[in-house]
Image: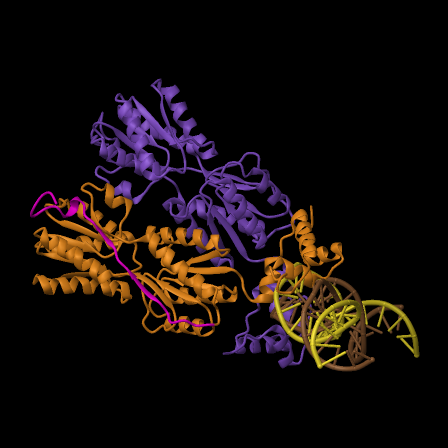
Chain colours: A purple, B orange, C yellow, D brown
DNA sequence: GTTTTTCGCTAAATCGTTTTAATGACTAAA
DNA sequence: TTTAGTCATTAAAACGATTTAGCGAAAAAC
């Protein structure tokens, strides 16, 4: 077993000081005017014996870990899994590793995770923050940590960048689409959550309700229930509101639960009920009939998020104004909203 | 900004040595017969000032990082995302954090990730290994690292635990189900992969073919293609083999691509074609008709994996025989295999 | 010919822990 | 009274890097 060599070993073998080796390995040879001849000798030797610096020792000394903490709501949700995958890939290319956790929108759990991440000297944070975590994030930022929020925004947190989508307009456009198709009694099934992205989507719905002068039907589902329970709630809601002719679901999993509810009620889509879901999913494309949905720009979100974070990481002391990016979504029109008027679009 | 206190600060304030503090904090007070009075004084003070040891320094000294490296094929695949989520939750409860990467079944990428994980002094490895990584894993294990493989097995790797499911019998049972339903021309759509789990599933198919004395139709799809390309291949295969009356897809995403192909060909399920997919998915439950699938015991797999790893982590020097766990799956019978014989099961 | 600069490199401190080996004081056995 | 053994604690050496401050020799400036 080859016992890992240290920088001391290297220095000893070459009969020079560890300082010199360190300078050379960190590309500070020019700056420290170390002779080209020596630089080459060291590099060659290091290459030969396959020496790799001990990351822990380095981190201890420098205070940098090259690890990014990623907090998503739930890694098993395809939206977050996709984002995570792309972020990871990108971070990796830039020499950063990702350490992640699912918050489950639970403030206490999130607090705890942040504590642990901080303890591990994570260099930067990417977070889809639950409500109630404002204070911790603010203190994190004050202590100098780069923070990028995505998917939802916390107004009270100053100094964090944000990347999100335009939920209000997305839903508004969805509503417009439904109204154009002749739907009039459109329900909005959402979470009983004050998170900014959910509020925005709700606003989009309400603006449309007002503008098109139609009735409002809102069903708020409590978060963190078992799926069957969500299905039951939606089922009972749909059963109660017989006049409905369309439903918008505000998240992908509400949409999935909603489809289960609709199936159990044996309602026909789109004849009995038009369906539109926020956030796309393989399932919606394949469903019979296929489900109209609002697709988020996953790749774009991921790229922006990691770019913003890297920017901050590479220019630590100089604090720039935080950036708030709002990307737009794409309405993917499918068969589930084809009922009332023209049967072909 | 409160500058983090160190153990030295604690010791100074209490006018005792850092050694004593360290012993007390690590629960070695009894063993080192430190007086109860002092223990209490230290614990109280530490609590009061909210001192947390520096994880990096500790890791540097002890060589343990309390980080587990998780390598999955693709975190955006719901199977792996679900496993990852459960493993993370469990690891977390035991004081371990997860650092993950997607291998994309690419040997080079995996090698690189392993290098980086090793560099970071990851304490243990959980991996769904691609082919060709045997050597690296073996050397990892030789160097004393605990390794647990899951989902697929590498025979040449000695000393790693393994948790998987019984793919051969699962597929065999699926075939039996199809044959019982009256299907005779059953195709098997799989990957052109030598990975053990894919080979097992194939064996299950072939055993059934032999036993039931029916024709064999195998379509192997190359990994790492764009989805549309997979869909095209399956489409052309189905078009070519007009005599087929059922298909088994060997993975969830092959199943999804397959359903897209079937849709584009306007084949009716289950009348024109029975469908069965290995690995369950929300989509299969909701699809019209719903798709019969082979469900893996996600929770059980995750629990076993993390339990085995923790066991190894907590008993480092004494090497036990590796454990190979094979869990069984559940055939979830749905409408996509209801065609030929009895219409109600 | 002295002083100052530049050059090329290094000694030693530091990051914050854990752990080995030892210490002085006291007690019990011989 | 010496010896040996507990007791309660600690000094100091690791772990493996980075970084500050500095040193002696040669070259340049005066």
Q: Is residue A107 left or right of residue B46?
A: left
Query: In this orientation, which residue lies closer to the viewer: B73 or B279?
Result: B279
Task: Give the quadrant of residue A161.
Answer: top right
Residue B267 image offset from top left, x and y in percent = 13, 46
Is B196 one of the magenta-colored residues? no
Residue at figure coordinates x 28%, y 43% from the top left: A283
Q: Magenta segment, which residues?
A: B318-345
Q: Is residue B36 left or right of residue A131?
A: right
- Magenta span dominant secondary structure: loop
Query: In this orientation, which residue lies closer to the viewer: B321 or B103?
Result: B321
Q: Considering only vertical position in the picture, is A147 above or below B236?
A: above
Is B319 one of the magenta-colored residues? yes
Residue A11 image offset from top left, x and y in percent = 64, 77
Q: Is residue B249 visible?
A: yes
Residue at figure coordinates x 68%, y 63% from the top left: B19
Q: Is residue B69 left or right of residue B11?
A: left
Residue B6 image offset from top left, x and y in percent = 68, 56
Exactly how many numbered labels are in the figure?
A: 0
In the rendered image, which quarter contains the C terminus of chain A?
top left
Task: Give the quadrant of residue B156.
Answer: bottom left
The residue furthest top is A213
Residue A234 image offset from top left, x and y in percent = 31, 31
């Amino acid at each position: 077993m080859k016992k890992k060599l240290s920088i001391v070993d290297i220095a000893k073998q070459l009969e020079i000081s560890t300082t010199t080796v360190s300078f050379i390995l960190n590309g500070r040879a020019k700056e420290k005017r170390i002779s080209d001849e020596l630089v080459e000798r060291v590099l060659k030797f290091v290459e030969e014996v396959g020496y790799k610096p001990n990351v822990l020792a380095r981190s201890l000394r420098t205070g940098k870990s090259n690890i990014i903490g990623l907090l998503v709501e739930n890694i098993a949700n395809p939206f977050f899994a996709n984002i995570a995958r792309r972020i990871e890939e990108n971070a990796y290319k830039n020499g950063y590793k990702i350490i992640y956790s699912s918050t489950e929108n639970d403030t206490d759990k999130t607090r705890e995770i942040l504590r642990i991440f901080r303890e591990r000297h994570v260099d930067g944070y990417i977070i889809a923050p639950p409500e109630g975590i404002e204070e911790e994030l603010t203190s994190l930022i004050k202590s100098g940590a780069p923070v990028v929020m995505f998917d939802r925004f916390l107004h009270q947190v100053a100094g964090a960048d944000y990347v999100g989508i335009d939920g209000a307009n997305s839903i508004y456009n969805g509503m417009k689409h439904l109204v154009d198709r002749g739907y009039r009694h459109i329900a909005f099934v959402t979470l009983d959550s004050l998170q900014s992205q959910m509020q925005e989507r709700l606003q989009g719905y309400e603006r449309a309700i007002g503008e098109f002068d139609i009735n409002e039907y809102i069903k708020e589902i409590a978060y963190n229930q078992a799926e069957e329970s969500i299905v039951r709630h939606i089922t009972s809601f749909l059963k109660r509101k017989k006049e409905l002719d369309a439903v918008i679901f505000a998240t992908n999993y509400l949409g999935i639960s909603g489809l289960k509810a609709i199936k159990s009620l044996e309602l026909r889509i789109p004849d009995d009920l038009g369906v539109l879901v926020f956030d796309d999913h393989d399932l919606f494309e394949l469903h019979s009939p296929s489900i109209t949905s609002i697709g988020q720009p996953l790749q774009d979100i991921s790229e922006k998020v990691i770019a913003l974070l890297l920017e901050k990481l590479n220019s630590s002391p100089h604090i720039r104004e935080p950036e708030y990016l709002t990307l737009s979504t794409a309405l993917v029109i499918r068969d589930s909203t084809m009922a009332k008027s023209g049967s072909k679009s």
